[in-house]
Each structure stands twice: as structure tokens, then as C-alpha cells.
Amino acid sequence: MTNFNLTLKYTFISLISVLATFFFHEFFHWIAGESLGYKMTMTLNSVSLTEGKYLQSWHDTLVSAAGPIFTIIQASTIYFIMRQNKNLLFYPFLFAPLYMRVLAGAMNFINLNDEGRISNTFGIGTFTLSIVVCLLLFFFVFKISKQNNYTVKFQIINLLMTMVFSSILILSDQFFSLKLIN
């Protein structure tokens, strides 16, 4: 792909991909917790117990795993769709999960994320699962990018848009803590 012109349509789809990726990631944490019988609260970028604590340690692990599992399913699905259908408009839905999990993995230095908590639970090192998940998602992005000859310029545009949109989402969550599901 030698010519890519950033359009309003592509920008809007990139915004939707970030919102959808974050929302469904958190929503699957919420579903897991509620399915186990806990009352959960969901914001734009977090899910937590409304009160109390998990009765079993595996409940915490399952709730932690639900979001990344959905994110991997999202990326895998888009990857297989894009292998057959080279529609550029699907790409943000493949790129956003990679960015999200790389950012979450880096945040393990400050506060354990999903994969970091699970890795610690299994005693395999804080960053092990984060690295495995990020490598898998990178593989999907790399293969599709290579297949479709996506340029460095195109990748940088996607990175910048994803950074801006996810930063707005994350900062909005920190400042406003809007409860989407309570």
C-alpha cells in the first residue's frame, strides 16, 4: 500500500475500534464476575467488585483472564477476516488490541494488570503472560501488515490515533469515573 490518505471515515472507525476494544474487554471482566455471583461495577477502563472480596482465589484469576481472552478472540477474528478480506477498515480493530495489551503490560511496573496478576498467581514472573499475549497480537498485526504491504507511515498514523483515543478514554475514566454498569 503506497498511498494512504487519512479520511474522516477511517479516523471515526479508529475511534470506534478503541472504544469497542476497551468496552468489550471490560465488559467480559464484568460478565465473568457477575456469572460467578459477584456484584460488579464497570467504568470505561476498569471493573471491580462493588463490595467485598473474591471468595476463591481462582475467581479473581478467572475474572482477570476474561478481558484478555476476549481481546485475543477479537484480534484473532479480525486477523482471519483480514486474511480473506483485505478491507483496510478492519485494521484498527486488529491494531487496538495490540496497543491496549502493550500499554497494560508496561503498566505492570506501576500496578499489576490482568496478565500480570495471573502470571504472579501462577508464579511465572510478572511479565510472562503479558509478553506472550503481546507477541501473539504482534504476530497478527505483522502478518496482516506484511500481507497488505502497509507502510511505516500508515502504522505511525494508526499508532498516533490509537494513542490519542485511548489516552482520552483512560484519562476520562480517571477523572470522571463514569460507572457504565453498577
Image: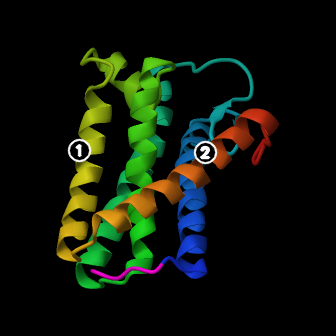
- Kindly indicate whether the residue at mark 2 contacts the one at mark 1 (C-beta within 8 angstroms): no
Mark 1, mark 2: which one is toward the viewer?
Answer: 2
Type of residue at label 1? Answer: Leu
The crowding category of the residue bearing disc 2, from other C-alpha atoms within 10 Å (few below 14, some 14 to 19, many at least 20), is few
Relative image position of residue 30 (x, y in whole percent): 61, 43
- In the picture of the structure, the residue carrying the numbered disc 1 is 135
Residue 167 is tagged as: 2
Q: Is residue 151 left or right of residue 53?
A: left
Task: Choose top left, top right, bottom left or bottom right for residue 78.
Answer: bottom left
> Which circle marks residue 160 in the picture?
none
27 lies above or below 45: below
**Marks 1/2: CA–CA distance:** 22 Å
Q: Nearer the viewer, residue 3 or 81?
A: 3
Whether residue 74 is visible to the viewer of this picture, yes or no, is: no
Secondary element at image label 1: helix
Q: Secondary structure at mark 2?
A: helix
Specify whether 1 is left or right of 34.
left
Q: Earlier in the sequence, mark 1 or mark 2?
A: 1
The residue located at (24%, 38%) in the rendering is 132
Viewer-nearest residue: 74 or 170: 170
Residue type beneath disc 2: Ser
Q: Magenta segment: does it hold 150?
A: no
Can you tell which quarter of the image residue 174 is in? top right
Nearer-the-camera pick, 161 or 86: 161
Q: How many marks?
A: 2
Instruction: Tell whether 147 sits left or right of 75.
Output: left
Indicate the quadrant containing the N terminus: top left, top right, bottom left or bottom right.
bottom left
Residue 180 in the image: x percent, y percent? 76, 48
Q: Residue at x 21, y 75 (%)?
A: 149
Q: Magenta residues?
A: 1-5
> Where residue 35 sits: x, y (%)?
58, 42
- Disc 1 crowd rating (10 Å Cα; few below 14, some 14-19, many 20+) is some
